[in-house]
Structure formats: C-alpha cells, structure tokens
Amino acid sequence: MEYKDYYSLLGVEKTATQEDIKRSYRKLARKYHPDLNKGADAEAKFKEIGEANEVLSDPEKRAAYDQLGDAHQPGQDFQSPPNWDAGFEFSGSPSRGRSEEEAYSEFFEGLFGQAYQQQRADRARARFNAKGQDHHAKVLINLEDSFTGAKQTIVLKVPELTPDGHLVVRERKLEVSIPKGVKQGQLIRLKGQGAPGLGDGGAGDLYLEIALNPHPLYRTDGVDLYLDLPVKPWEAALGGRVKVPTPGGVVDVKVPAGSKQGSKLRLKGRGLPAKPSGDMYVELQIALPPADSTRAKELYESMARDLDFDPREKLIREIQSREQDHSNA
Amino acid sequence: MTGEVLTDDPKLTLDDLCETCGVSEVTIRAYVAEGVIEVNGDDAGRWRFSEITLVRVQKAYRLQRDLRLNAAGAALALELMSQIEALNDQLERLKRIRE
C-alpha cells in the first residue's frame, strides 16, 4: 500500500496544534465538498482530507500515526510494521457521516481498519436494518435524445464490501430510457437502484441528473430553444420566406419586412416536447454579402450614393449634447 | 429500465419526505422554516412537497453534515450555489456566442 502524508494533505506542519488541524480541515472541506466543487477530482480529494482529519483530529490515532516516523514519502510503498499499534488504544468509531460503503484508502484500512472490521461484523450480527444510500449520477444526453426519447447505457462505479470486509469497486451498467422532453437539470429517479440496504432495509434510489450536451445550433432555456439565423440584408428589409432548421425538421418561416438585426421570431410549439410544448425563438443575424466582385462593388457604391443612411447619427448627436452640457456647467 | 421524472406536483407528505431522504422531521421543519424547500398546506399534517424537494433536502443535509452548517447556513449555501450555476450557464452561453 502507499504511504499517505496526512499532514501535507491538510497543509499543516507536524507541530500543528489540534486547533490548527481543525481549522485547516474545515477550510479544505468547504473548498472540496463535492456539492460545492464540480471539479473531477473534488470528491476524491474530499475523501482524502476527510481521512487525514479522521486520523489527525483524534489524539490517539495521531500519536500512533506520528510514531511511524519521518522516513516515508507520500506515494511510497508502505507496510505497517508488525504490532505497530501496540500500546495505543483506539476508542473512536468510524467518523460521523461516512457510511460503511464509503472507501477509506488501503493505507488507512491497513493501519486502523481492524477495529472497524470488528465493528462491522458486530453490526452485521445485530441484524441492523437501514435503507441503503441514495446514489447520484449525471447523464449527458444530446438535444435530439430529449426530442425523440432515447435509450442510454450508463456505467456506475460502486464500492462494495465483500463478506470478509474488503472493499472492491464494481462497475455496473444500466440501460436507462430517457423520456421524451427531458430538460436540462431534470432528475430521473430509479427506485431501488442505489446502494443495498442493511438487513431488511430496502435499497436506496438512484437519481440521474440530465445534462444536455451543447448543441451546435440550438441553445436551450427550459423547454424553449433559441437559434441564431443568418439572413440576407434584403430578406430583413423587404421580408421573405426562409428555411429554418428545427429538431423536428426544416420549416418555412416568413420574415416580416423591416426586420432588424437581432429581431426575434417565435415558432410556437417547435421547442422541446412537453405539455404544452416549448417554443423556438429565431434570432435574426443580418449577414453582409462580401464586396468581392466588380458587380458587388458597384451595388455597394450605388447604395452609398443613393441611400440616405447614417447608422452613427445617434452616436454623434449623443456625444455633442454631452459636450454642450459640459461646457455649460 | 425506466425511471420516473421528478415533477413539481406537490404530492409527498412529511413522512414520505423523511423516509425517502433518511432525515428526521426536525430537519425538514427547519428547512421549511428557513425556506430551503417550498411547501403546500398550512399545518404540518397537511404539508405536501414536490419531488424536486427531495434533491434539495438531500443536498442541504449533506452540506449540513459534512461542513457542520446549521439550517440557515445550508439555506444560504444552496441559494448561492444556484446563483453561481445560473451565472455559469450565462457565461457559457455568452462564450459560445462569441466564438
């Protein structure tokens, strides 16, 4: 097993007081709590500092750990010396909040595991009944899956305790139906698919949180969809019919004459399926044709000559009136 | 395997909620008092909760247990977390528009 430097995990010196250790642990626990920190290794880190705290915050365990000496490096292969814990009395029970299915490191189990295995065995004999823990997992789906409904295979890593008290991580594959119309952040509950209960307690539930992969075209807001649609300047100015992609297929949409950059069109019921179905909002983005030919240049030049159009008129007026105010003051 | 999508219909009783989340009635009462979860009905006997609250209760409880918060602290943490989530969504959206 690998040696763990519990002091450096908590960022404290070997000479730290119990107060220092507590403070440092609390700070790190807030930083790495998996509900607060969405980083991929936050959960592992949170467990690691929890374990370090478990040992260092308990004077008995800390003293036992300290006498392992300075000779070890983190990550180094480590064997606990025979009878290393002779003369130390451990009165602690597994820490609050850490349920039995949660894994301690092999290092911790090697040092402090025995006492706990005994307790586990005692407890098993006592026919303790409790509902199993609920599990949580995130499922990434594509927008199209929500539009049509889909089946998705998810792989869960489940720590399990073997009858002789060893911890193994099993992979569990589940094929789950994704119902039509699920939204970002929505939760699906699979009853009895969480951790097994103790004794006669039923299994916990598995909660799946839906997360939508970003779509190259559409943004979602609940059941509504948003699409940026490039249009030609004359389609916006004169109006016209344009083809618009929706998850249900391409539809024909009328652009009203006099549409502006950023104007929104609503396609009722073209969002995600629901009761009532969401809408799709099409935001017009006016695209400029390039002046890359003689003819195109001529057209731009004739517009420049013939159109009385100054998009900056308002800006200039605004700045002039401010200058005026300033000199009056 | 088909799961059920959690809805916001208020259909869970106080007992249902305690049992599903594995927390005590005292905890739920504190969460109601702090506004961590929404409730339908006047007195506790007639309280009805939506299934969405299940997840909020569990999250609040984990925070409370692991970080030694009280109910008010857990309520504040949840509120700030949802604000951060909304801001992150907005940020992602704006980033993608700029690309």
Image: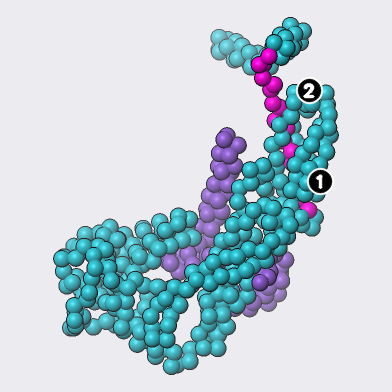
Residue stretch rendered in magenta on the structure: A277-293
Q: Quadrant of the C terminus of chain A?
A: top right
The image shows residue A165, relative to residue A264, as above or below, that is: below
Q: Please state which amino acid type lies under the numbered disc 1.
A: Lys
List x then y, in percent, for residue A324: 60, 10
List x then y, in percent, for residue A14: 20, 63
Q: CA distance from mark 1 to mark 2?
A: 25 Å
Note the chain letter of the cyan one: A
Q: Residue furthest top?
A: A305
- Please name which of the two marks, 1 or 2, marks the residue nearer to the observer: 2
Chain letter of disc 1 in the image: A
Earlier residue among tags 1 and 2 = 2
Dot 2 falls on a residue whose secondary structure is helix
Q: Which residue is mark 1?
A: A268
Residue shown at the point (67%, 66%) measured from the top left: A177
Q: Which residue is mark 2?
A: A234
The image shows residue A300, relative to residue A241, as above or below, that is: above
Chain B colour is purple
Q: Quadrant of the N terminus of chain A?
A: bottom left
Task: Give the side of residue A71 with respect to residue B47, left or right.
Answer: left
> Is residue B51 in view?
no
Dot 1 falls on a residue whose secondary structure is loop
Q: Is residue A304 magenta?
A: no
List x then y, in percent, for residue A266: 79, 41
